Image (cartoon, grey):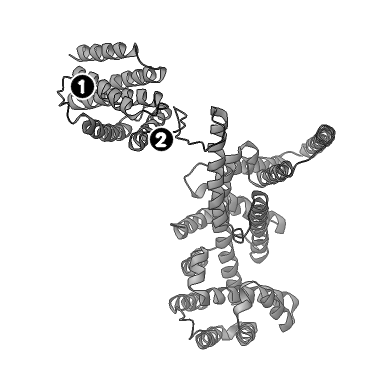
Amino acid sequence: MRNLSSLKKEFLRKWIKGLRKYNSQKKNMNLLERKKAIKLSADLAMASTKDKTTLWRKALFANTSTKIDDEQDMSTTSSTPQKKVIRKNSTNSYPLRKRITGRRKILRRNHTKERVEASFIAMRLVKKRTRKLKSLLPGGKFMDDSCLVDETLDYIESLKAQVEVMRCLVTSSELFINQP
Amino acid sequence: MLHCLNTSSNLVGGGNISDMTVLERQRARIKFQNEHQQFSGNGFSSSHQQQFMMLGCDSALGEIVTNSMKPDPDYENGFDEETVKKRKTDNKVDLNSKDKRIKVCVEEGESKIVEQRKGQKNTKFNNGNKNKRENCEDSNSKENSKGSEIQNQKPDYIHVRARRGQATDSHSLAERVRREKISERMKYLQDLVPGCNKIAGKAGMLDEIINYVQSLQRQVEFLSMKLAAVNPRLDFNIDELFAKEVFTQNFPTTGIPSEMTNPAYLQFNSAQQLVSCCGGLINNMGIIPPEIGLCRNINAPTSASLPEIFLDSSIFTHILPSSTWEGNFQNLHNVDFDQARSISFPSQPFTGMVEASNMKMEM
């Protein structure tokens, strides 16, 4: 809570800068593209505001860079859609296998452990939720348990700041538009 | 001379090694490396001496640690004095037999200071090792002060105490430390996430955290969509940015406590946002549905404390066309003052808002 206003200002500055860059690259975008650009630049700004190097920031950087690369690929080469389809197929096949193996495991457990204890259930619940939280955080796959909680703390803080700044911008721009 | 001292220290180290543990040997090695690093710097007359004493003290304490499971205080004392004496004679410092014990304590403090200084000086020094040593020293001081308590030590890293009936092998100790750390962090998280205080149990808390993160992420999505919808071209000019800076300055600093301190301003803000939402909606639809606005306001969590009249007036004043914008602001201002006489309304943010609108009017 100590320097939140300064953090917000920094975030805003970087965000606006990123937006300008984006704007200079592409002139007329449709709504979805604009939204994507706004979100990307906001994410990047959020990841770069603090000089702390946490995992999720790095992951965000990596994700956004890959996204941008993809977009550039899309815009430059025409043969990418086929590749993408192939990729999609391959990615679709992996989760199925995983699911099957998971079912098998559960079945085995049921066979071996007939008596299910309360603590066991609780542990499973916690594990499930941790997995979900990991999937929510950017780069959550690479975190262990203790690290995860730290990262979540940091992530929530900066998300809060981001949401507030964005809300401010929305209200102000709406005011701006409403009073021509 | 340098070499001479170097070798002497080496010799002393070697002499000690005969009755040292592995830990001490490691320390001696680290120390040795350290000396090499320091040679390039200033003449090591005092610092070297101090460090040397520290080494002696350190190793002595290490021996105490290894013997700490024996609860006999006399034995410890004797050991202490003996080892310290040995080092002292090595350093050619005389000691009175009366206040050896006190000097041990003093030296301990000194060694810690040196340790800190050294940490600042030598950036090359291996961090992990330093941590080890510091932790060890901490535990040592505790040990000395508490005397013959039955303590359980993981000798290298962290001071852990196992309660009765708990496992004492290194794996379960490490596991326990990890769990404690996690639960501590979870407490911080509990403070950060609203509505998480009442929930006991890790699963529930995790649920709440997940919901919160998801809602925040969705908010970001929504807001970016809205921004994209509002701005047909992505140019946020500087004037607007300035106006917004006024906003951000006026905005209460996020924390829940600050929101609690000036609820009136929060009311204003929420009303403002809702009104702007309604405005956008009305602009889109072209009709004026006051019911919708009211419903929205009632649905919003913060507006439960808002009186109905305030809602009505604010909405209607904002629904009016923008030529009377200024007047509306004044209107709202007055109304709010009427409402907030009892709540001790902060007038500072309001003037800021009005100024912002003025700026925009001029632009």
* Placement of B148 over or under A24, stated as above or below: above
Residue type at the position of mark 2: Glu
Q: Chain of mark 1?
A: B
Give the x, y percent position of residue A68: 65, 43
Picture mark count: 2
Give the x, y percent position of residue B224: 64, 59
Would residue B181 be found to the left or right of residue A139 on screen? left
* Placement of B119 over or under B196, stated as above or below: above
Mark 1 lies on residue: B88
Q: Answer with the quarter of the image where residue A157 lies.
A: bottom right
Of the 4 image quadrants, the one containing the C terminus of chain A is bottom right
Residue type at the position of mark 1: Lys
Q: CA distance from mark 1 to mark 2?
A: 29 Å
Give the x, y percent position of residue B79: 30, 23
Mark 2 lies on residue: B149
Nearer to the camera, A86 or B332: B332
Residue under the point 21% across and 31% down? B103
> In terms of secondary structure, where does tag 1 sit?
helix
Mark 1 surroundings: few (<14), some (14-19) or many (≥20) residues within 10 A: some
Mark toward the viewer: 1 or 2? 2
| Residue B37: mark | none
Q: Answer with the quarter of the image where residue B42 lies.
A: top left
